[in-house]
Image (spheres, rainbow, N blue to C red):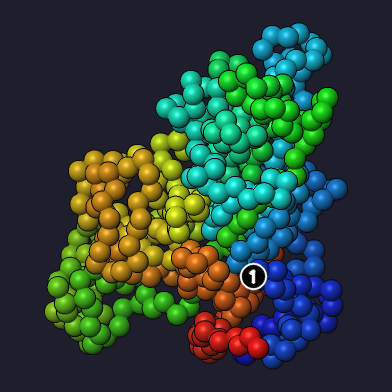
Amino acid sequence: MIAGSVALIALSIINPGMSIAVYQNIVITSQMLQGIGVTVALSATAGLLNPTPLDPSNIGPQGQLPVQSPNPLWRICYGIFQFAGAITFVDGPILNWAGTGSGLVCNNQYVHRVHTLTAHQIAGFLAVVIDGQTYNFGTDLVLLTNANNSNGQAGPPGMWAFISNSNPWSGQIFFEFDCGDPGNANQPFPGLQSNATWLGIPFGSTRWTAKCLQRGRSKVHVFLHYVAGNNSAPWGPLGGAPQPYVLTNGRVPIVEFKIAGRIIRDYRVVTAWQPGATYSQFNYVLATGADFLLDIFVQQNASGVSAGNAPNFAGIGPGALVSDGTCLWQNCGTPFYAAGSGFTALNDPRGTKLGGPGGTILIADAWQGSAIVPLNLVIEAPIGWLQQATAVSGPTGLLRPNFSTVAGSGPTDGGVTWTCLGRSQYATCLPDNDGTQNQGGFSNPALVIADYLQTPKNQFGLGATLTADSIDSVIAAANICDEPVVIEVF
């Protein structure tokens, strides 16, 4: 049980209907919260009952909230879930495309929708489900580029789409994904901006303005294209397949998304320098450097033992070295983490961010394709693991490499060689190879509750600060939650 300075029991009394989604449809109810066994003043929960947006200007035009279905603005998901979210933006139908004239019906029409999923950044997208059928990334859904979209007939570059004519949705439905990275101040959906063009024809929305970022919330742009299909059409539904639009025999499909939920901290990962500790090459510690930032210091010697007193990390700038017993530390600057880094774009045709089992998971880590990276740059990829650029002769590759999770090893990525430094501060998010469980516990109940306790009130949490004793309890509980349990079937 978690012994903390702030408890959820008071909240469960105030709001007995409250629940938190955790993993595979498991829900922490108010009755379960009352069993956590910690105490709190009722005032600690006051702000939670009437939360306010972190930045209202990023919700929609003029900061307006969609009053019909505001729940996704506060939905919290830990672990793996599948749902449609709520439609928070719609524009269309457009009847004037390709010069058909005002209000005239034509065979090329489209409509934009934005499905808002959660109130926070997520770890990635696992699949798209259309009318109950699951479609995987990399095999079914492909990131469109200038090279693979059949001279522009498949769809706009930078969108995810079906390029096989055997698929009834080919040329009819397209996607842009945003994990809700709060560090990304750019437009999440280039294909939704008013200056977006396809085959030289504008198809974006003038209603999706610079205010429409929904920053810090995961979401998907669904672009539905109506085109009358037949067996001789070069693209589009063949043999009278369903049309993704409401004209004639068409209809709007039911679209859902399978996601890997919120990125959470794993308190079991030790990042502070320790006296008299053995550090192998490529082990790291986090400390404030001469740049006044929390930098990463990487051990350079084959093996070493730290001294009794900490070295002067605060006097060491990025790139410089400092001796420590038989260790030699190099300041490699501030790492780029997946959470809040702004480096998690998922629709860049210069780099396909697919990883995990079979390369079918759209991972929102800090890797970017076709990018120039400096020597010794450290990124988090996949979520839960740090990688250092130990050799650089050119930009990164087009396809996301299969990153190592063993310290001291790593792949070649275009002109960059990455070396794994070990676990990051965040819980790992990739499913096991059988796709049934999670490595590292980003749905670990103890870590989930700790994350909820410490998340600021103006987002969705209690805004508490855990004491050292509380963190020890979280670590102990997290270890128990990670123990395998044998279920016997009789």
Quadrant showing the C terminus:
bottom right
Side of 490 where 14 appears, left or right: right
Q: In which quarter of the image is residue 323?
A: bottom left
**Residue 237: % across, % down:** 67, 29
Q: Name the residue under label 1.
A: 23
Judge by depth and name the residue closer to the eye, 178 or 170.
170
Q: Which residue is drawn at 55% across and 86% down?
A: 485
Amino acid found under the numbered disc labelled 1: Tyr
Q: Along the line of sight, which residue is nearer the eye, 182 or 437?
A: 437
Label 1: how many residues lie within 10 Å, few (<14), some (14-19) or many (20+)? many
- Relative to 270, 137 lies left or right: right
> Considering the numbered disc 1 on the image, is that residue within a helix, a strand or a loop?
strand
Residue at image location 66% in from the left, 82% down from the top:
6
- Foreground of the two, 416 or 140: 140
Q: How many labels does the image show?
A: 1
Vertical relation: 412 (above or below) 383: above
Above or below 452: residue 343: above
Residue 167: x %, y % from top left:
61, 36
Q: Which residue is drawn at 44% across and 52% down?
A: 359
The image position of residue 342, as x and y in percent, is 48, 49
